[in-house]
């Protein structure tokens, strides 16, 4: 199994990604909110260091300075 991690501003897009990967039974972990993208990226970097071999999913779509950031992880 591979651990997938990433950051996002829209939970519905992460839910859709998760569903599209056919991972209905696997647990999804979400953290946040983070006040800024920099804080979310710091969490992501920390997770990369703690979980060797994990894969990062880049955030998709436009960014909004008013919307908080969240982190997520799941096993694929």
Image (tube, rainbow, N blue to C red):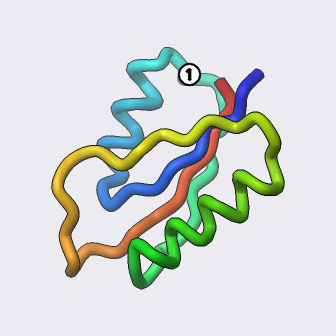
Q: Position of residue 19 (x, y in %)?
A: 42, 24
Residue 28 visible at all = no
Residue 17 visible at all = yes
Q: Measured along the vertical axis of the image, is residue 76 above or below residue 40? A: above
Q: In this orientation, which residue lies closer to the viewer: 34 or 15?
A: 34
Q: Position of residue 13 (x, y in %)?
A: 31, 42
Residue shown at the point (36%, 49%) measured from the top left: 59
Q: In this orientation, which residue lies closer to the viewer: 15 or 5?
A: 5
Image-based side of 9 in relation to 26, left or right: left
Query: Which residue is identified by label 1?
Result: 23
User: Residue extending furthest bottom?
Assistant: 35
User: Residue extending furthest top?
Assistant: 22
Residue shown at the point (66%, 28%) measured from the top left: 26
Residue shown at the point (62%, 35%) measured from the top left: 55
Residue shown at the point (47%, 19%) measured from the top left: 21
Q: Measured along the vertical axis of the image, is residue 56 above or below residue 37? A: above
Instruction: Count all numbered tags in the image, as a single digit.
Output: 1
Q: Position of residue 11 (x, y in %)?
A: 36, 52
Label 1 neighbourhood size at 10 Å, few (<14), some (14-19), many (20+)? some
Q: Position of residue 48 (x, y in %)?
A: 71, 52
Q: Measured along the vertical axis of the image, is residue 25 above or below residue 11? A: above
Image-based side of 53 in relation to 24, left or right: right
Which image quarter holds the C terminus? Answer: top right
The quadrant in which residue 10 appears is bottom left
Is disc 1 placed on a helix, strand or loop?
loop
Which image quarter holds the N terminus? Answer: top right
């Amino acid at each position: 199994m591979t651990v997938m991690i990433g950051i996002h501003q829209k939970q519905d897009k992460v839910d859709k990604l998760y569903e599209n990967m056919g991972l209905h039974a696997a647990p999804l972990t979400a953290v946040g909110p983070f006040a800024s993208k920099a804080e979310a990226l710091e969490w992501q970097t920390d997770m990369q260091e703690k979980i060797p071999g994990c894969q990062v999913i880049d955030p998709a779509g436009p960014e909004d300075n008013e919307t908080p950031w969240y982190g997520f992880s799941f096993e694929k």
